């Protein structure tokens, strides 16, 4: 039986998720009142999207959540599936889910244009494509916007396949489908129930945003896979590290090694894995050491191995940064000044930071700052000296109005991460939307996750596996939030989608076990030899 007590992990997660969402609702209310009164308010409270649609989602979500909990608790069949450690034909069901996921993504990819981007490469897709061609030619991208180091993954495919774009999109299909399988493995490992893994994998297999993203010539899909894969090995280490045989067989070395390698690949694609590495160290010392009972000596050994593997895998990038940028750094430093400067720009009402007016304003500001120092043209802003000029200008703007900058970051950008803009005003039309079906489901999923977190906060959960999973979700959320803070593209929230689905699925199991009728379940568990249903 579950041991129920409030713990720090659930509190932190509830705060990380609930507060941004509540601030998003408050922002929409403020914006509505501002439009009604005609009073112009602070720029950081401007927010795009539909007020009526947002309230429809936030009001409908608790109702649907309560109905779902009621259905789970009233149905012995559902509870038996949720709490039974095994399910018949589980391999067949898993194969069917993987096949459906693959077919949906293949259909999506073959229904888009496969014409390669043409130079000059201005869009994200074009820059990533040009980056891959550059690596084939032995060139290192000098411009920050052309860094697109997913080109390292695409370059071998481009040399093997005639249709470059289709090859890159097929990589999206493969990594997205494998992410579905990893979600199954993680959920099964943490919950101890095969059915929970099948439910989570099934939800992600048909999740529209995860499917649609495969057709984009972007980095999000492979990055999400390698991040989930890295944290899979980290979670496995936390789950298995209390077993003596795990250390005697030295299997822990392989798990830590694979975690480090996948973090390195993540860092090749986007400069976020250093943050995960830092938090993983804290996790290994505090969570695993205190809650799982792993000795401090073994925790430190695991940290050293993880650090050596991770930094060895990105050593080439550090050397390249020193050679071309004059800075021995593990991050893509080519554009740090530009990104920081972009994060200080005010937004116009009803628009996002990724609109053309914003880019024009950013370009104008860059030219003004560079002209003051008689610096190189903006086309050469990959150089360290120019980035230093822009970074200093950004810090001056932040120090001139620190409260406005921090408030903008907290309310505007974090709200958009968790409560994305909804296209349109009519809820009925929105639910039948053809162009952005993922927006609605993404908002519902986030709302359900918040409600799950609050439910677990009320119930409490004292279980090391649950804490391992919650920490993994917070790691990915932190990465997405930090990356989103300055660039503010809404697609970064998709990094969190697999973990939101896992957490929501497991919360259903915990709540079912807490409030459901357990007489049938307990006898079934005894038949399988499982005295508990710990998550």
Image: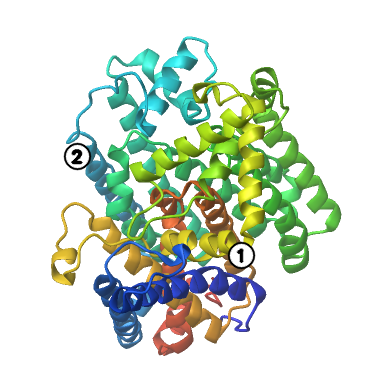
Where is residue 249 drawn, in percent x and y? 72, 44
Characterize the local packing of mark 2: few (<14), some (14-19) or many (20 or more) Cα atoms within 10 angstroms.
Answer: few
Residue 181 is left or right of residue 269, and the answer is: left
Residue bearing mark 2 = 107
- Closer mark to the observer between disc 1 and disc 2: 1
Characterize the local packing of mark 1: few (<14), some (14-19) or many (20 or more) Cα atoms within 10 angstroms.
Answer: few
Q: Which residue is drawn at 53% across and 38% down?
A: 270
Colour basis: rainbow
Q: Which picture quadrant has residue 133?
A: top left
First in sequence: mark 1 vs mark 2: 2
**Residue 403: which disc?**
1
- Looking at this view, name the residue that lies furthest to the front: 372
Residue 513 is left or right of residue 259, and the answer is: left
**Residue 487: which disc?**
none
Q: From the viewer's perspective, is residue 151 above or below residue 414?
A: above
Q: From the viewer's perspective, is residue 118 above or below residue 361?
A: above
Q: Is mark 1 on a helix, strand or loop?
A: helix
Q: In which quarter of the image is the N terminus?
A: bottom right
Residue 297 is left or right of residue 436, and the answer is: right
Residue 39 is left or right of residue 53, and the answer is: right
Q: In which quarter of the image is the C terminus?
A: bottom right
Q: Distance between the residues labelled 1 and 2?
A: 48 Å
């Amino acid at each position: 039986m579950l041991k129920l007590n409030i713990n720090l992990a659930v509190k932190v997660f509830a705060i990380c998720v609930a507060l941004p969402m509540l601030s998003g609702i408050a922002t929409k209310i403020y914006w509505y009142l501002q439009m009604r009164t005609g009073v112009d308010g602070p720029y950081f409270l401007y927010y795009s999207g539909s007020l009526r649609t947002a309230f429809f989602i936030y009001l409908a979500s608790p109702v649907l959540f309560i109905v779902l909990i009621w259905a789970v608790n009233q149905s012995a069949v559902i509870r038996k599936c949720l709490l039974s450690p095994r399910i018949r034909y589980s391999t067949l069901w898993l194969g069917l889910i993987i096949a459906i996921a693959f077919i949906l993504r293949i259909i999506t990819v073959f229904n888009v244009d496969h014409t390669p981007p043409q130079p000059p490469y201005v869009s994200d897709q074009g820059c990533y494509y040009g980056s891959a061609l550059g690596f084939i030619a032995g060139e290192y991208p000098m411009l920050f916007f052309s860094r697109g180091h997913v080109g390292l993954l695409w370059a071998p495919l481009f040399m093997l396949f005639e249709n470059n774009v289709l090859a890159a999109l097929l990589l999206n299909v493969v990594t997205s489908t494998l992410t579905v399988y990893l979600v199954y493995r993680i959920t099964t490992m943490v919950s101890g129930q095969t059915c929970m893994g099948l439910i989570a994998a099934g939800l992600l297999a048909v999740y529209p945003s995860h499917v649609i993203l495969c057709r984009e010539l972007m980095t999000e899909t492979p990055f999400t896979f390698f991040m989930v894969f890295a944290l899979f090995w980290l979670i496995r280490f936390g789950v298995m590290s209390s077993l003596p045989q795990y250390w005697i067989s030295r299997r822990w070395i392989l798990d830590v090694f694979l975690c480090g390698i996948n973090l390195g690949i993540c860092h090749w694609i986007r400069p976020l894995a250093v943050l995960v590495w830092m938090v993983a160290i804290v996790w290994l010392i505090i969570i695993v050491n205190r809650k799982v009972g792993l000795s401090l000596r073994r925790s430190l050994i695991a940290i050293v191995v993880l650090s050596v593997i991770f930094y060895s895998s990105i050593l080439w990038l550090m050397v390249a940064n020193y050679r071309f940028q004059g800075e021995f750094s593990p991050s893509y430093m080519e554009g740090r000044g530009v990104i920081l400067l972009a994060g200080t720009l005010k937004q116009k009402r009803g628009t996002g930071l990724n609109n053309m007016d914003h880019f024009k304003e950013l370009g104008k500001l860059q030219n003004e700052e560079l002209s003051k120092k008689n610096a190189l043209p903006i086309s050469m802003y990959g150089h360290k000296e120019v980035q230093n000029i822009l970074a200093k200008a950004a810090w001056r703007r932040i120090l001139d109005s620190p409260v406005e900058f921090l408030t903008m970051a907290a309310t505007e950008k974090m709200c958009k991460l968790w409560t994305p803009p909804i296209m349109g005003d009519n809820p009925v039309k929105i639910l039948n939307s053809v162009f952005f079906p993922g927006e609605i489901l993404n908002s519902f999923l986030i709302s359900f996750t918040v409600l799950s977190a609050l439910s677990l906060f009320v119930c409490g959960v004292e279980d090391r596996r649950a804490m391992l999973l919650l920490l993994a979700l917070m790691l990915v959320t932190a990465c997405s939030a930090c990356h989103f803070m300055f660039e503010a593209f809404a697609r970064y929230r998709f990094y969190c989608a697999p973990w939101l689905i896992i957490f929501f699925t497991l919360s259903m199991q915990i709540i079912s076990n807490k409030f459901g009728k357990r007489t049938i379940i307990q006898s079934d568990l005894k038949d399988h030899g499982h005295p508990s249903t710990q998550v």
